[in-house]
Structure formats: structure tokens, C-alpha cells
Image (tube, coloured by chain):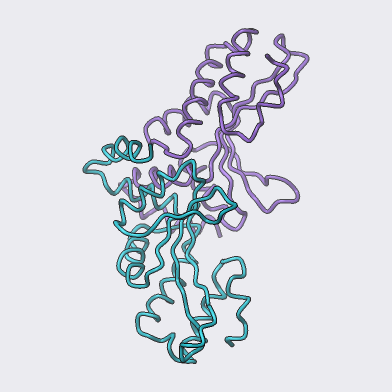
Chain colours: A cyan, B purple
Amino acid sequence: MSQNYLNRYLPLFHNKRKYLYWYLTGIVDGEGSFSVSFKRHPNLKSGWLVDPVFQVYQHKKHREVLELLKEVFQTGSIYQKSDTHPVMVYGIHSLKTIKEKIIPFFTKYRLIIKQKDFLIFKEIVERMDRKEHLTKEGLKKIHQLALKMNQQGKGRKYLAIE
Amino acid sequence: MSQNYLNRYLPLFHNKRKYLYWYLTGIVDGEGSFSVSFKRHPNLKSGWLVDPVFQVYQHKKHREVLELLKEVFQTGSIYQKSDTHPVMVYGIHSLKTIKEKIIPFFTKYRLIIKQKDFLIFKEIVERMDRKEHLTKEGLKKIHQLALKMNQQGKGRKYLAIE
């Protein structure tokens, strides 16, 4: 069913891909999230695993929107949020893919609602790309940046990092 | 603050208004609603007031998105959802404005998530424009259409219409 929908919807944007990209920017501005979580990880020297994630949520009735994102980015996966929620998630968890596909996309197609979060997310991804999260000072700075993001207190649980 | 944001954001779309329209289509697909409510109204012959409304919701921190919609449609109003919620609403309640601005816009800029609701909403607005809601048969048909919309049971309360 979803694939049928895409087959009908995508031709509307033939030679007009930028319209589709702006539509998806609107979707992400409403339903997307840029987040960074910190997980205890005794095997790492810093003691913490830093995990940047790009996600877009949608009720399973409309997973075709998530498939459209997957089609456009040619990467990422679609999964159910939890056993108990009828919500699907399109997620990209790879730092490399986030750096190569997500950061350039939303640098070009500018968000409004999520713009502040995106800019902090971008800075964290750039710092991680320079391996700064592997040092104590770098990790602390990244954690301070993450606290400025509007991610429902995800970072606040980990004050022990500071 | 909001106005400053618009002053910075709108020039990005100079000569590229269609990009802005597709962005807003994405926003509405995520955060918008097309709904029709039925209110008891003893002064009307049919006994019911039929009320189609186009609304877009946003946390008050980002009311600039709602102001962008108001700027583009050059109509509508922005108000707080309720005393207890930090949510703002951009709403158009006039049948004439909905018919002249909202219906043509989303006929051209096609939604995905809300497309089914939009098409039913469009049919109801067209029927109301032909005054069909003023007859018992017409009202019943409009109510049946409204029941097919995904509006969290708003219509279901009024089964007495049938």
C-alpha cells in the first residue's frame, strides 16, 4: 500500500525534487527530532558512549511519509517505537551517515522550529567527527551543548558527566 | 522576536515562493487539522450549526511558524488553545476564506498524511457553499462525510443528526 502511494506521489516531483525536499523539511520541522544521548559504557576510556540520532515519528497509518524520507536519503531504517505504541520511527543512528547526508541537507533546507536544535546537533556531530568526545574535556563540552537542546531532559539524567 | 525571524527567513524564498509553500505543506501535514463540528443551534431551521475549521497547532515558543502561515494566506487569526496549554493555534473559521484560500492551496500543494481528511473537508465545504447543509437530507450527508474524517470522534457525539 505504502509503495503504491509513493509510486503515485513521487512522479508529482519529477524534475521538481526541490519541492519535495522543502515538503520534507516541513515534515521534519514538525515531527522530527535531533537528539544526543549519553550511555554508560565501561569499555570506553571516557566511560560514556555518545549517541547522536536523527529521527522522524509518524503513526503507523502513515508510514509512507517515513518511506519517502528513506527513499530521498537512500539510507536509514523504519521501526516501531515500542511494542505498545502504534508509532513508527524513521531513524539514522550512524555518525557517518548523519554527517554526510543529514547535516548538509538541513544546512541547505533551513528549518524553523527545530533550527536551534539542529545547529547544536551539527556542532556536536562536527566535534565527534574530530574525535573530541574521546577526551574528558571534549566530552564535557559536548554534554554541555546537548543540555541546551530541547530533548525532553534526555541529557539531564547524566549530570554525573560534569 | 517572531517578526524578526520572519524578516530573516522570508528573504530566503525571494522569487522562490513555491519552496516556502511546499515547506508549509509539510508543516500542515504534520501539525494541521481539517475539522467539521456540529453544534446545536435552535435558531437554525435544521437545528444544527455546521462549522468547518482549518487549524495549525504549535507550541508558543514557535509561534513564528503560525505567523508565516498568516503572512502567506494574508488572513486567519492566532490564539492560545486554552488558558492551561502553552499551545498556539492558527485558525481560519470563515467558510468563504476556507473556500477561496485553503481549498485551492492544498489542491495544488498535495498533502500526504492529511490528504484523505482534506478531500472530505473539501467536499463538505463545496456542499456548504451550495447551501446543502440547510436541508435535512443535505445535513445528514455532510454529517456522514464528517464521520469519515479522522477528527478524534468530534462528529461521533452528534449521532442524533441521523
Identify whether B146 is placed above or below A126. above
| Residue A125 x %, y % | 40, 75
| Residue lying at 44% horizontally and 50% vertically, measured from the top left | A27
| Residue A79 x %, y % | 45, 55
Q: Nearer the viewer, residue A79 or B13?
A: A79
Numbered circles on residues, count: 0
Q: Judge from the rendering whether residue A152 lies leftward or rightward of residue B161; answer left or right.
A: left
Q: Nearer the viewer, residue A20 or B15?
A: A20
Q: Nearer the viewer, residue B3 or B158?
A: B158
Identify whether B76 is placed above or below A72. above
Identify whether A75 is placed above or below A128. above
As drawn, the residue found furthest toward the left would be A15
| Residue A8 x %, y % | 31, 35
| Residue lying at 43% horizontally and 56% vertically, measured from the top left | A90
Identify whether B132 is placed above or below A41. above
**In which quadrant of the rendered image does the C terminus of chain A lie?**
bottom right
Q: Nearer the viewer, residue B49 or B145?
A: B145
State the image quarter where residue B158 is shown.
Answer: top right
**In which quadrant of the rendered image does the N terminus of chain A lie?**
top left
As drawn, the residue found furthest toward the right would be B42
| Residue A26 x %, y % | 43, 50
Q: Judge from the rendering whether residue B110 lies leftward or rightward of residue B148; answer left or right.
A: left
